Image: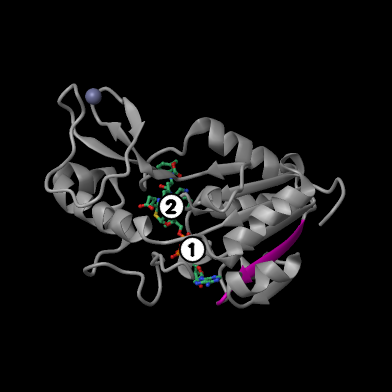
């Protein structure tokens, strides 16, 4: 991992699973029979903002009590060893655990659950309160929403632009703990591979991305990533 090779790590919910954060899909990943495709949408928020907020408040409560795990820590160590310039961490996670572990060159493709944004005036601010009794509101009166990316919404332009560039220039990409079904995140791995990167997957299960991988490491991120050090 040392030297001038450009490494990109693309992570998903599986990297936080060992911290006790539920994943989206698969066993134990659902909430009240909803699928993310049904709750994480602008339409769902428009129809029933309180229902969507209850989901986010439940998740923020869980997140406020968890800590980064050995997988997050290993990625932060790798960044320290290699230097942040040659080491880009692209995450789909909104939990902030990579930064909590000390990673600095982090691209949050799907935003952050700890930032709220007004649906009327777009004012945004960090907010870590949990245990909501009603929908939070902006000073302008508009409803506040989590500053995350829902289905059908564009990813933050500067973030996806930087991620596409990093993936295209990568010599090495490791894809960790993502089901690889959500776009455009999953296509970053394809882009890296097509541009000549050596691609490695770390996952407890096979995914739609497995077939393009040079190497697949089947197992838990928290067990496998520390071995890279
Ligand atoms: C372990 C482990 C352990 C467990 N160790 N591993 C092209 C084709 C078809 C559709 C589209 C397309 N382009 C765009 C779309 C539409 C859509 C999309 O992708 N749909 C597909 C589902 C079909 N995409 C979008 O709408 C995106 N926007 C967009 O493209 O804008 C332009 C556009 C607009 C309109 C039309 C067309 C284009 C936005 C996507 C936003 C996703 N948002 C969410 C919610 C974020 C906020 C929140 O957190 O609440 O992001 S959904 C949810 O899924 C969340 C995640 O980041 C994302 C990915 O999930 P992830 O991380 O992969 O988790 P899981 O649970 O799925 O998988 C966990 C994995 O870990 C599993 O594989 C386990 O095996 C593994 N694992 N424990 C290692 N210990
Ligand atoms: Zn406002």
Place of residue 98 in the rendered image (x, y in percent of width and height, measured from the top left): 55, 52
Return the mark for residue 203: none
Which residue appears at 83% of the width and 48% of the height? 5
Residue behind label 2 places its C-beta within 8 angstroms of ligand 1: yes
Which residue appears at 51% of the width and 44% of the height? 108
Q: Is residue 200 magenta?
A: yes
Res. 195 in view: no
Which residue appears at 74% of the width and 66% of the height? 228
Compared with 22, 131 (above or below) is above
Pick the front one: 58 or 143: 58
Question: Which residue is labeled 2 in the image?
Answer: 95
Pick the front one: 129 or 149: 129
Return the mark for residue 16: 1
Instruction: Determine whether, in the image, residue 149 is placed left or right of residue 2.
Output: left
Determine whether the residue tagged by mark 2 lies in a helix, strand or loop: loop
| Magenta residue span | 198-204
Which residue appears at 78% of the width and 49% of the height? 82
**Mark 1–mark 2 distance (CA, rounded to whole Å):** 8 Å
């Amino acid at each position: 991992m040392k030297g001038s090779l450009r490494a990109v790590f693309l992570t998903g919910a599986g990297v936080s699973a060992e911290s006790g954060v539920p994943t989206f899909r698969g066993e134990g990943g659902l909430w009240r029979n909803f699928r993310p495709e049904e709750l994480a949408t602008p339409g769902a928020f428009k129809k029933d903002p309180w229902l969507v907020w209850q989901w986010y408040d439940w998740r923020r409560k869980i997140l406020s009590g968890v800590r980064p795990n050995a997988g997050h820590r290993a990625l932060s160590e790798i960044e320290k060893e290699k230097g942040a310039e040659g080491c880009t961490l692209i995450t789909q996670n909104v939990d902030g655990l990579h930064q909590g572990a000390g990673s600095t060159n982090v691209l949050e493709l799907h935003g952050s659950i700890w930032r709220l944004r007004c649906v009327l005036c777009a004012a945004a601010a960090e907010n870590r309160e949990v245990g909501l009794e009603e929908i939070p509101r902006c000073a302008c009166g508009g409803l506040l929403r989590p500053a995350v990316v829902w289905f059908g919404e564009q990813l933050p332009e500067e973030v996806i632009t930087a991620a596409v560039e990093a993936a295209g220039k990568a010599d090495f990409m490791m894809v960790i703990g993502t089901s690889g079904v959500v776009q455009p995140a999953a296509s970053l791995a394809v882009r890296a591979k097509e541009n000549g990167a050596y691609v490695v997957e770390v996952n407890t299960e096979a995914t739609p991305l497995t077939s393009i991988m040079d190497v697949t490491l089947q197992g838990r991120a928290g067990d496998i990533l520390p071995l890279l050090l």
